[in-house]
Amino acid sequence: MEQLLATDRHIHGLYPHVDIWGFPISAYLFLGGLAAGILVFAAIYYLLGREKEMPFTVKIAPIFAFPIIMLGLFLLIFDLHHKLFVWQLFLAARPESPMSWGAWTLVIVSVFSLLWPLSFVDSIDDYLIKRGWSKMTKVTEAIIKFEHKWIIPHFIIMSFRKYRKFFAVVLLIYSIILGIYTGILLSAFNAHPLWNNPILGPLFLTSGVSTGSAFVMWLSDNHKERLLMSAIDMSLIAIELFFIVHMFMGMEAGAEVYKQAAHMFLGGEFTAVFWGVFVGLGLILPFTLEALELRGFHIPTALPALLILAGGLLFRILMVSAGQMSEYAMFP
Amino acid sequence: MAIDITKCVGCGDCVVACQTENNVPIGYSRDWIMEFVEGDFPNLNLHFETQRCNHCEDTPCVRTCPTGASHVIEGGIVKVTHNECIGCGACIEACPYDARYFHPDGYVDKCTFCDHRLEDGLDPACVSVCPTECMHFGDLDDPGSEVSKLLKERENYSIIPEAGTKPQIFYLK
């Protein structure tokens, strides 16, 4: 059977396939994963008691998490079509809807990502003086002054410091939920067979944590920290590749619609950009560069780091746009 | 709802009736016509399907709605409360039939089976204008209703049942 005509179906963003989520959503998924990755490392290395050896990972990198989340949130709200009603999200808690618990997770993580660097403000001040960025210490000093002057912020930050171990555990759990959520948000849609697979959550989490490690590796001034992040990132890339192969194997073994979804990447229109650009330049090339660096070759750290970050963004753009093209057929 | 594809001529009256009845903005539609052809030339067989929200029993749109704006009312009709909808698009992505769209005012809009007409004991606008009377509307839970009898008597199918949403519109062959 063949479909000839669809009368009165030419609605923008609906026909010939749903196309309502574009770059802002992909970018938000990327930023959410990146922030989750940064915070996961901060919480883990704090809990392991290595904050002195890895000051950048534990104290400095999380400064960026809050603005990254805020940028993501801005993109998310910018993409809503009924923007003025956004507060309705926080009048409901619907566990069945990933977007609902994602919104709540985002609130919790953004509060923690703000409090975490604030509780380290003294160490950040020292760090800035040590690096010779005395102009920026004005900000940290103002925060310290503000904190000492007002009782409520002082109380909040002091109690955060006091129970930091407990908060680190909570932060770790919620960052992981945030990372997984960016994938589960898509995998909850049965109508798009490409998204509708359980591996997408872990895959997005791994990719997000990998971009987080790339971010730390890129900006850290500590050689040991960079090498450690490099080694961690290599294993994350290996896991990611395994998940990707596993995802397509699962689809190939599935029903017709899943096979069609997989074929978009295995011979279809997304093949070259996915395997060539994302897997080739965004995973395998940085993996090789990191391996060479660990063997003592001098490679600018920014190169693999930026490749991974760009790859992470491209991966989400591809999954969001290809997913919307993968649909059930109306006819056998 | 039961739709007789042996009677449908694809005139589009149902689409226009819906647009008029529900003040659907120009360029949008809550129902539409699909045209299918099967067989090899010269033995071709053409049929039309008038399609709309299937008011599924297992609703992915309601499940993914983060605010609860999408809901099922008594009787099984799926509706959207406009001032609870944030326009995120999750329900549009969740629908295998692409039956939902963004209203130009921002909220998500869709077929309501003309529940305002049902309250007055009338048929939905699309059903009542159909010149070939190919559409039948009624209570599927009532074994004595016209639709239940038609579905018992005649061979029928629903669209994309494999998506697992239990669609509630049936096409009579």
Image (tube, rainbow, N blue to C red):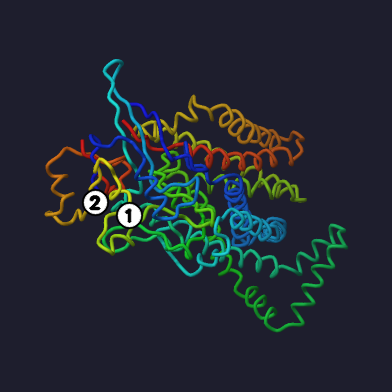
> Where residue A244 appears, x then y in whole percent?
49, 36
Helix, strand or loop under label 1: loop
Residue pushed farthest bottom? A151
Q: CA distance from mark 2 to mark 1?
A: 9 Å
Q: Nearer the viewer, residue A50 or A215?
A: A215
State which chain disc 2 sits on: B
Q: Nearer the viewer, residue A230 or B28?
A: B28
Helix, strand or loop under label 2: loop
Quadrant of the rendered image containing residue A95: bottom left
* Residue A107 to residue A10: above or below: below
Q: Is residue B124 left or right of residue A93?
A: left
Number of marks: 2
Question: What is the crowding at mark 1: few (fewer than 14 residues within 10 Å), some, or many (at least 20)?
Answer: many
Q: Nearer the viewer, residue A208 or A266?
A: A266
Amino acid beneath label 1? Phe
Quadrant of the rendered image containing residue A293: top right
- For the point 59% across and 30% down, which residue is it? A273
Q: Residue at label 2?
A: B137
Say whether marks 2 and 1 touch (CB < 8 Å): yes
Marks 2, 1 in one chain: yes
Whichever of labels 2 and 1 marks the residue nearer the N terminus, that label is 1
Q: Is residue B60 left or right of residue B104?
A: left
Q: Is residue A243 visible?
A: no
State which chain disc 1 sits on: B
Amino acid beneath label 2? Phe
> Where residue A102 appears, x then y in whole percent?
50, 59
* Residue A61 to residue A284: above or below: below
Q: Is residue B99 visible?
A: yes
Q: Residue at label 1?
A: B113
- For the point 73% across and 35% down, which residue is it? A296
> Where residue A86 appears, x then y in whole percent?
55, 63
Q: Is residue A294 left or right of residue A332?
A: right
